[in-house]
Image (tube, grey):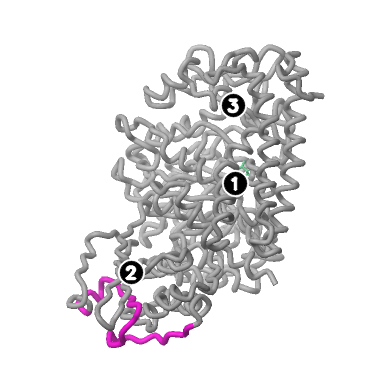
């Protein structure tokens, strides 16, 4: 019985404090639903499920305002019915926003869950349940919430054979044996989890669209895709599909996929019509084109604006979107060629096209210019295209951050990226204000991330990796939330209110990214992993490869010179203030030193130690801290149900062992290269 592992943060544990139980029971005796839609129905179902499990009550749902002691669900449309009951102003919230108000008069307690639309009511419901799961009083609740980001999206990298690209938690919950899975129950539970943290869009197949998946936009699969879309629709989530840019050739028997060819245009227009017949509120296409051997407009000497706009025109009549990825670079680079810099690629390709894209195109940009490393600079493309919709792409699945065997809580990393000041509009122009659409007049924008879930009974392989999915949603709803706040919310809902559990797990999560960074690749240089699989240390694994991912370590020093005068000139892609900061050795922050500069091993960091000594220190310390993670967890034995306790303990033990492998490989490599001994004379091989 994997009940708790599976329920994730929607545990709805029985309230055992008698006084609180009484209080909650009084507030929730009745449910009054003034509106009626499939989304509202989901809210009602969630309430029923949660209240019966937490409070052991089974309130009936009625549609009249009559009963006392009640939860009232309503949208703006039913505003007039509430007018004389409470003072409400829907102008305070945006399309997906909501208000929660509790009003207590003599003999009647009411909690209002009010949204501008039905999705808001559902979000309000989940918020109320979060309060209850965290044992907050319902007296005088007055919450006004609007999401900061318009698109809050998940990208599934699921293939139809059931595998998941970069998936570390089992097989796909969507597909099996080149077809849709037979059991969609799990998809509904996934929709509940996503909606509970405000996610409103999902692309349900891998951005690498292979043979069978190319047919997802045909009548052979659209009926099933439509069923999946209905499940998500009931939770306020729009469904998108990743498409193969060469579909017109592969499905349409055309000889070309040239975006300026009229037959190609026509083909996509008809295709769009067909898709919308099956899924009337279809979100649109997610496109990986001219990237890592995927087809795209370059084949026809067209640029990415031509490529995206052709699809945009087809989707325009239906308000569909084209989400066009900027992960475009030369993946067949000659390592001897020192002038090509993969980090430059997205900016070099897309910046010149600013203003050339249709209004329903959004450029989806990875947080860093390389590829989801444990530490890299923030992509200079953010803020550099004031006339083109942009959105963020994060990776929840831990491809380069321990593959859900290691604990690596990514909320602190994502916060750093979102808070990064681009200077695009002068000082205080953080990335989060680019992607929330407030800095430039973007029609569409938001944040997407690659999911970390599969059909493992705990969804995410490492049970603590559930926190990354939770945190992504919450942060995307509101990037100003503190990491600590999100973390505590999650722990309370997942593990209950034990203070020691809260203290230890919170500490573990919040330190884990830093710890992982310490024992893996140093000072922002990245990579140093086994090629292909990307797990485990291999310092030169990518050094003489075609992927543009080098560290340039020799006997004297290490790092990538990306400066203007002597390097690849990448630093110049930033706005002036950041160019200056990164270009100079004096001002470049330590943690990114090797991302921007090639320096001797004896170069002194701002921290006071040399680069080589920093490498040794952090690798020894990283292992110690990984051991401390395990000890902190072990101290919680008996306070957490045994399945989750053992699962997590096993992973932490594996992490400790593997961190030693990292430590010894990296330290030995650099000791042998440099010949410089560890000042503290610790064991290096
Ligand atoms: C990474 C990852 C690939 C993925 C690619 C992408 O390179 O390793 O598996 O396809 O990113 O984002 O398109």
Look at discs 3 and 1 and give the one toward the viewer: 1
Q: Quadrant of the C terminus?
A: top right
In this rendered view, identify the residue nearer to me: 437 or 592: 592
Q: Residue at x 40, y 58 (%)?
A: 320
Look at discs 1 and 2 and give the one toward the viewer: 2
Question: Would residue 327 be counted in the magenta stretch?
Answer: no
| Mark closer to the chain start, 3 or 1 | 1
The residues colored magenta run 57-81
What residue sits right under mark 2 in the picture?
A: 139
| Mark closer to the chain start, 1 or 2 | 2
The part of the image, by quadrant, that contains residue 273 is bottom left
The picture places residue 588, in percent across and down from the top left corner, at 48, 21
User: Residue most toward the right?
Assistant: 685
Q: Note whether 144 is above or below 37 in the view shown.
A: above
Q: Assign a secondary structure to mark 1.
A: helix
Q: Assign a secondary structure to mark 2.
A: loop
What residue sits right under mark 3 in the picture?
A: 523
């Amino acid at each position: 019985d994997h009940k708790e592992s599976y329920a994730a943060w929607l545990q709805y544990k029985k309230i055992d404090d008698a006084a609180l139980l009484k209080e909650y029971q009084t507030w929730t005796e009745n449910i009054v639903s003034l509106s009626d839609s499939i989304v509202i129905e989901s809210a009602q179902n969630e309430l029923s499920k949660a209240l019966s499990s937490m409070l052991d009550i089974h309130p009936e749902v009625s549609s009249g305002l009559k009963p006392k002691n009640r939860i009232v669900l309503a949208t703006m449309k039913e505003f007039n019915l509430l007018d004389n009951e409470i003072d409400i102003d829907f102008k305070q919230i945006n399309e997906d926003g909501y208000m929660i108000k509790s009003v207590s008069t003599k003999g009647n307690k009411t909690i209002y869950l009010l949204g501008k639309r039905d999705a808001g009511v559902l979000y309000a419901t989940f918020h109320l349940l979060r309060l209850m799961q965290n044992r907050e009083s319902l007296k005088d609740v007055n919450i006004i919430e609007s999401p900061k980001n318009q698109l809050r999206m998940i990208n599934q990298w699921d293939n139809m054979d059931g595998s998941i690209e970069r998936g570390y938690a089992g097989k796909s919950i969507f597909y099996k044996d080149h077809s849709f899975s037979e059991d969609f129950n799990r998809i509904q539970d996934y929709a509940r989890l996503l909606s509970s943290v405000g996610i409103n869009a999902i692309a349900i197949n891998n951005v690498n669209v292979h043979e069978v998946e190319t047919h997802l936009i045909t009548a052979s699969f659209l009926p099933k895709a439509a069923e999946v879309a209905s499940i998500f629709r009931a939770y306020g989530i729009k469904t998108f599909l990743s498409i193969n840019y060469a579909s017109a050739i592969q499905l349409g028997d055309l000889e070309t996929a040239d975006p300026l060819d009229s037959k190609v245009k026509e083909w996509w227009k008809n295709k769009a019509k067909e898709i919308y017949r099956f899924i009337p509120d279809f979100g649109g296409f997610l496109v990986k084109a001219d990237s890592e051997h995927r087809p795209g407009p370059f084949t026809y000497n067209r640029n990415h604006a031509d490529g995206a706009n052709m699809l945009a025109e087809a989707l325009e009549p239906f308000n569909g979107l084209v989400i066009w990825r900027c992960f475009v670079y030369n993946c067949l680079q000659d390592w001897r060629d020192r002038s090509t810099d993969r980090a430059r690629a997205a900016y070099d390709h897309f910046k010149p096209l600013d203003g050339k894209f249709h209004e329903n195109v959004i450029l989806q940009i990875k947080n860093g210019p390389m590829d989801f490393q444990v530490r890299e600079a923030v992509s200079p493309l953010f803020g550099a295209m004031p006339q083109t919709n942009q959105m963020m792409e994060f990776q929840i699945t831990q491809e380069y951050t321990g593959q859900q065997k290691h604990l690596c809580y990514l909320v602190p990393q994502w916060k750093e990226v979102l808070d990064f000041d681009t200077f695009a509009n002068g000082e205080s122009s953080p990335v989060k204000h680019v992607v929330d659409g407030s800095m430039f007049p973007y029609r569409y924008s938001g944040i997407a991330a690659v999911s970390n879930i599969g059909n493992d009974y705990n969804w995410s392989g490492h049970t603590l990796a559930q926190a990354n999915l939770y945190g992504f949603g919450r942060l995307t709803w509101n990037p100003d939330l503190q990491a600590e706040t999100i973390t505590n919310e999650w722990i309370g809902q997942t593990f209950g209110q034990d203070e020691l559990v809260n203290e230890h797990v919170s500490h573990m999560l919040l330190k884990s990214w830093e710890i992982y960074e310490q024992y893996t690749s140093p000072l922002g240089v990245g990579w140093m992993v086994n090629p292909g699989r990307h797990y485990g240390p291999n310092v030169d694994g990518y050094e003489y490869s075609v992927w543009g991912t080098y560290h340039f370590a020799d006997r004297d020093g290490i790092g990538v010179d990306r400066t203007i005068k002597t390097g690849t000139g990448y630093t110049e892609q930033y706005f002036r203030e950041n160019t200056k900061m990164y270009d100079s050795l004096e001002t470049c922050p330590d943690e990114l030193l090797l991302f921007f500069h090639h320096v001797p091993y004896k170069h002194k960091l701002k921290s006071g130690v040399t680069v080589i000594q920093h490498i040794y220190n952090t690798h020894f310390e990283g292992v110690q801290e990984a051991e401390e993670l395990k000890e902190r967890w072990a101290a919680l034995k008996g306070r957490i149900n045994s399945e989750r306790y053992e699962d997590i303990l096993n992973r932490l033990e594996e992490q400790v062992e593997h961190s030693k492998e990292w430590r010894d490989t990296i330290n030995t490599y650099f000791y042998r290269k440099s010949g410089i001994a560890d000042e503290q004379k610790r064991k290096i091989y």
